[in-house]
Amino acid sequence: MTEPPREPSFVPAAAPAEPPGEVAELGRRIRHEIAKVVVAQDEAIDHILVALLAAGHVLLEGVPGTGKTLMVLALSRTFGGRFSRVQFTPDLMPTDVTGHTLYDAKSGQFQVRKGPAFTNLLLADEINRAPAKTQAALLEVMQEQQISIEGRTFELTPPFMTLATQNPIEQEGTYPLPEAQLDRFLLKVVVSYPALEEEVHLVQRVTSGRIGDRLDVAAVQAVTTPEEVVAMQRKVGTVLLDERVLRYAVEVVRATRNWQGLRVGVGPRGAVSLVRAARAAAALAGRDFVTPDDVRRIAVPALAHRVIVAPELEIEGYTAERAVGDLLDQVEAPRL
């Protein structure tokens, strides 16, 4: 008698209580709206959605004019929650982000004036232009999800997500983020140049019947609410993870610590981030379980910003992204 075909070994026998189809549908709706104004950045948008559903933060890196700010503005329109934007400059103070107290002469009391960090979606534009103490203030808010002002602690209303942008080619007058602070970002998303046909379509769309080059996101409609996003984040937490897939993710992270060409590898926080992101990627794909391919697909944006390439190889153009890609080819994934 012929045996029936076996299920893949990492597919769970029981599905979680919350089906992931709603998560995938939410991702489809948000992508559809963002695509109305953003051209040729599908992978970057997917990674931003992974971070949103994993309740993480994103560092967007790319040369000027590749649509980083436009993507965030479009996402904010789909979100339906509060949105704040801070242009980071060398004279920006921590209180300009978090808030401060102000003396009210009429009442004779100090009043708390909340800063732009009291929001659901925060765009920190050109974060590497602000001094270290201002960067640290924002990153503390990202980690603790709360803000202290003059001895009073304020909890942020979930969801809270920070998308920070930085320009990798203009370093004069900037303050690069230290590695310990980079580790606070769930993903680093590199926004690259579009292909020829995509760029032709982009230029045609932007210049047709418009005056100036203002970022126009009026066509984007709200398709979700903060409450629905929080509910979807909870569902992502129910996506099942087989022990062998979990071990594979940890082995990938540990391989960075002994990889030739890397001076510093990824810490345990990176393994946690990789698993969180892989769960969100699986849910966006409509599955209730994580596969090794989910780990592989999200490994570069989840880990590359957490490693340091050896100086002698960095001079030759060897990048952190290439290092993570190379070691993925060497770490054996669980077989079916």
Image: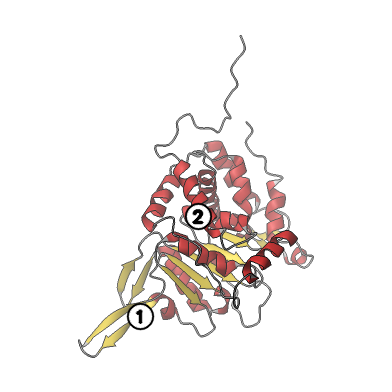
**Residues marked 2 and 1 touching at CB (< 8 Å):** no
Is residue 125 toward the left or the right of residue 230 in the image? right
Q: Tell me residue 150's x, y (percent).
A: 32, 78
Placement of 135 over or under 329, stated as above or below: below
What is the image's colouring? Answer: secondary structure
Closest to the observer: 259 or 23? 23
Q: Tell me residue 138's x, y (percent).
A: 46, 71
Is residue 291 toward the left or the right of residue 107 in the image? right
N-terminal-most mark, 2 or 1: 2
Tag 1 residue: 100
Tag 2 residue: 30
Determine the residue positioned at 52% across, 57% down: 33
**Image quadrant occupied by the N terminus:** top right
Is label 2 in a helix, a strand or a loop? helix
Q: How crowded is mark 1: few (under 14 residues within 10 Å), some or many (20 or more)?
A: some
Residue type indicated by callout 1: His
Q: Tell me residue 267's x, y (percent).
A: 56, 56
Closest to the observer: 207 or 196? 207
**Image quadrant occupied by the C terminus:** top right
Is label 1 in a helix, a strand or a loop? strand
Placement of 274 over or under 291, stated as above or below: below
Task: Work out whether residue 184 can be spotted.
Answer: no
